[in-house]
């Protein structure tokens, strides 16, 4: 079965009229309360949860979302669609949600292409009703080969079979800024040695005021021009796994064969002073 990645607004409206689709709104609660897609459940933690060794790392993250999604009533049988406001102003948070659902083993999950703005642009129904949630027995079935640990990323440096994509903003890439949260939010600035840079925005386009992913061919061309091989294993990182999830989604759309997300990203790497970094302007 072809992996589901994106769904457009009209297709979601049609699908939700025919089936019990589990829709997740990843925006902040205030935005959700002002209006959302009918039946949508608000799970902002898909964007704000940060995984670090000191808070239990990946195992604690899995437990957190297991309990959260049980409370929301999700089951493995559901078809799930996640959305944010627009796919560039939430740092890819709907893609972060989609990626985490895939990591947790959700068989059918998709991102609403264009987000809430695309839904509103089609003048589809908006609701302020909060769904009554019946708890489930949701149990993750981890797909561990799509997530990269810090140890795996360290081992990838210099490995000719693995290519590393840094998709952060330019100031982060050259070590002029530590994160989107502030200049000194992380203790070190720079990049993982050997990484190639393609800013996540470059894989998207704006049409009618709404951000969309570029076509598969355009995405593939941009990455190949930057030195990436679609047949090689690709590790992606950003700051906390949101922008990297956005680019993970883009590379999957473009047919890259083996894509993995260093989910803890620079927020973890920069805090371990035993790990190497580069900064400044690359030679090439």
Image (spheres, grey):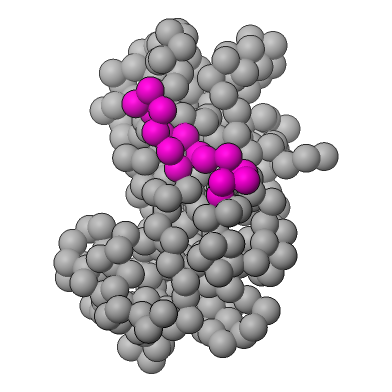
Q: Residue furthest bottom?
A: 274
Residue 158 seen from this side: yes
Using the image as rendered, state which of residue 147 and residue 244 is in the foreground: 244
Screen quadrant of the C terminus: bottom left
The segment highlighted magenta reads 204-219
Residue 58 seen from this side: no
Image coords of residue 40 (percent x, y): 48, 23
Residue depicted at x 62% and y 85%: 159
Image coords of residue 187 (percent x, y): 23, 77
Screen quadrant of the N terminus: top right
Residue depicted at x 67% and y 29%: 79
Residue depicted at x 37% and y 76%: 191
Using the image as rendered, state which of residue 251 and residue 242 is in the foreground: 251
Q: Residue furthest right?
A: 1
Among the 4 quarters of the image, the one containing residue 88: top left
Image coords of residue 178 (percent x, y): 25, 69
Q: Residue furthest left?
A: 183
Was residue 238 drawn as part of the magenta stretch in this picture?
A: no
Q: Could you tell whether 184 is left or right of 149 in the image?
A: left
Image coords of residue 259 (percent x, y): 63, 61
Among the 4 quarters of the image, the one containing residue 4: top right
């Amino acid at each position: 079965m072809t992996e589901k990645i994106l769904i457009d607004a009209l297709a979601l409206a049609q699908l939700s009229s025919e089936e019990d689709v589990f829709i997740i709104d990843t925006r902040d609660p205030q935005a959700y309360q002002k209006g959302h897609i009918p039946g949508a459940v608000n799970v902002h933690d898909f964007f704000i949860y940060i995984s670090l060794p000191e808070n239990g790392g990946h195992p604690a993250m899995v437990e957190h979302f297991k309990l959260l999604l049980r409370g929301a009533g999700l089951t493995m049988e559901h078809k799930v669609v996640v959305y944010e406001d627009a796919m560039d102003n939430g740092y890819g948070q709907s893609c972060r949600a989609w990626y985490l659902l895939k990591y947790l083993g959700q068989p059918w999950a998709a991102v609403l292409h264009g987000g809430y703005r695309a839904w509103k642009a089609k003048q589809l129904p908006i609701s302020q009703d909060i769904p009554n949630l019946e708890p489930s027995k949701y149990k993750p079935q981890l797909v561990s080969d799509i997530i990269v640990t810090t140890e795996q990323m360290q081992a990838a440096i210099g490995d000719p079979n693995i290519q590393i994509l840094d998709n952060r903003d330019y100031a982060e890439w050259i070590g002029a800024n530590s994160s989107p949260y502030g200049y000194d939010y992380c203790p070190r600035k720079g990049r993982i040695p050997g990484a190639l840079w393609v800013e996540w925005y470059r894989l998207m386009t704006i049409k009618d005021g709404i951000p969309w992913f570029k076509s598969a061919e355009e995405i593939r061309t941009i990455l190949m021009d930057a030195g990436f091989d679609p047949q090689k294993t690709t590790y992606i990182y950003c700051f906390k796994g949101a922008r990297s999830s956005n680019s993970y989604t883009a590379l999957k759309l473009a047919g890259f064969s083996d894509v993995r997300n260093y989910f803890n990203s620079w927020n973890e790497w920069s805090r371990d002073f035993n790990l190497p970094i580069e900064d400044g302007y690359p030679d090439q």
